[in-house]
Image (spheres, grey):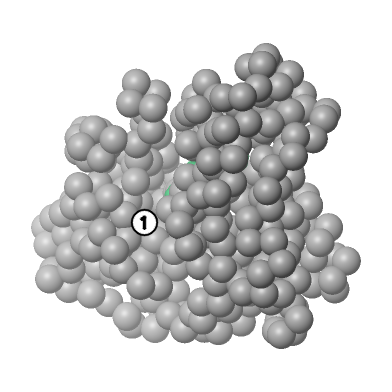
């Protein structure tokens, strides 16, 4: 089956075409949000509007496909920035209506968490550590659509922490990759509080760490080496809180296979440390390549392929939702 996947829930317009497990094309057009210091919803929606059609045309060209070859359209319809979702969903519905192609609305987080099935051929059930710009979650994925949320974002998500701290210390957006780069020069630990230290829950909280890091920066000497040390310490402290949550989870759940997904999973330091942690605890960790961790059309096309196999189609009453449970 040839499936087209459209992702426009935040600031990346990304379209991919899959022929079952074979990727025919993947085009991602990212926005430059530095003049706003982050994602500005109205601007993001306008950018999607101007880039969605050219991105689609390039995808078809790269895949050497015609619209009449497409057998199913998957489109992220929840959750996300409403204006951004409206662009993708309206575009997908227009294609569906004009070319008589079945359509499937995809939950953005489901798309993130099925990617390892595409990249590593892993099957349900497995545990999920999902770290993105809007969510930090620990999930047991039992089967398609059956997700048991063990722990979730109490306040700021981990990606939000990266982005807000980056802005405060004079780095570009998105903050995650910039902090990762800056941290490579760090060699001394700056003391930061580990969120929820000693708490036995599985939830994640990052707003206290954000404020603490911002305070350290404001009180520090603002040198390049201080910035690098702060970035290095921030990544280490994020790892420490994730480690505590996972140790709590593993005391109760014996799930063997785990996946690390979402934009923050592109972070090499966190990937490596979490992989070591899993090894030490006799768990297997699968992490997709970085370009399939950050928002992309492939994950949407793949989620649609899985749903199409189960005949879980939508119709033209499909609409976007800014918020939606997984
Ligand atoms: O999944 P994603 O692309 O979009 C959402 O669904 O939110 O995640 C975006 C988040 C941003 O906060 C960005 O700073 C973060 O992922 N991110 C990273 C890295 N690459 C992207 N965080 C840490 N290290 C990275 N290399
Ligand atoms: Zn995402």
> Percent position (x, y) of residue 118?
57, 64
Tell me the quarter of the picture where residue 214 sits. top right
Q: Nearer the viewer, residue 32 or 204?
A: 204
- Residue sticking out furthest to the front: 219
> Percent position (x, y) of residue 222?
63, 17
Q: Residue at x 44, y 63 (%)?
A: 109
Q: Nearer the viewer, residue 277 or 151?
A: 151
Q: Residue at x 48, y 62 (%)?
A: 154
- Residue sticking out furthest to the right: 280
Q: Is residue 286 visible?
A: no
> Percent position (x, y) of residue 39?
34, 36
Q: In the picture, which quadrant includes the N terminus? A: bottom left
Q: Residue at x 47, y 83 (%)?
A: 146
User: Which residue position is annotated with label 1?
Assistant: 5
Asked if residue 298 is positioned above or below residue 129 in the image, the reply reads: above
Q: Nearer the viewer, residue 184 or 14?
A: 184
Q: Nearer the viewer, residue 200 or 1?
A: 200
Asked if residue 89 is positioned above or below residue 26 in the image, the reply reads: below
> Percent position (x, y) of residue 185?
77, 24
Total marks in image: 1
State the SS at label 1: strand
Q: Is residue 137 visible?
A: yes
57 vs 38, left or right, is left
Q: Residues within 10 Å of mark 1 (few under 14, many from 20)?
A: many
Tell me the quarter of the picture where residue 279 sits. bottom right
153 vs 30, left or right, is right
């Amino acid at each position: 089956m040839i499936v087209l996947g459209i992702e426009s829930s935040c600031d990346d317009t990304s379209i991919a075409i899959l022929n079952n497990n074979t990727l025919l094309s993947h085009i991602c057009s990212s926005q430059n949000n530095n003049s706003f210091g982050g994602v500005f919803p109205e601007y993001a929606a306008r950018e999607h509007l101007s880039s969605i059609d050219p991105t689609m045309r390039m995808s078809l060209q790269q895949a050497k496909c015609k619209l009449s070859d497409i057998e199913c359209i998957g489109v992220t319809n929840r959750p996300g920035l409403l204006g951004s979702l409206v662009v993708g969903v309206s575009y997908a519905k227009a294609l569906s209506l004009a070319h008589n192609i079945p359509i499937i609305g995809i939950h953005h987080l489901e798309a993130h968490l099925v990617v390892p099935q595409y990249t590593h051929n892993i099957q349900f059930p497995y545990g999920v550590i999902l770290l993105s710009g809007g969510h930090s979650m620990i999930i047991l994925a039992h089967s398609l659509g059956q997700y048991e949320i063990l722990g979730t974002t109490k306040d700021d998500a981990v990606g939000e922490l990266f982005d807000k701290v980056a802005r405060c210390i004079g780095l570009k957006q998105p903050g995650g990759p910039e902090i990762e780069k800056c941290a490579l020069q760090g060699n001394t630990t700056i003391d930061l509080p580990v969120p929820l230290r000693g708490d036995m829950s599985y939830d994640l909280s990052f707003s206290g760490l954000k404020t603490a890091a911002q305070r350290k920066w404001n009180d520090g000497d603002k040198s390049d080496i201080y910035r690098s040390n702060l970035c290095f310490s921030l990544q280490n402290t994020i790892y420490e809180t994730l480690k505590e949550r996972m140790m709590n989870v593993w005391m109760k759940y014996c799930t063997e296979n785990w996946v690390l997904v979402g934009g923050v999973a592109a972070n090499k330091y966190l990937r490596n440390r979490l992989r070591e942690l899993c090894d030490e605890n006799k768990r297997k960790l699968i992490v997709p390549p970085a370009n399939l961790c950050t928002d992309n059309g492939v994950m949407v096309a793949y989620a649609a392929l899985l749903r199409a196999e189960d005949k879980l189609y939508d119709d033209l009453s499909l609409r976007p939702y800014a918020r939606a449970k997984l």
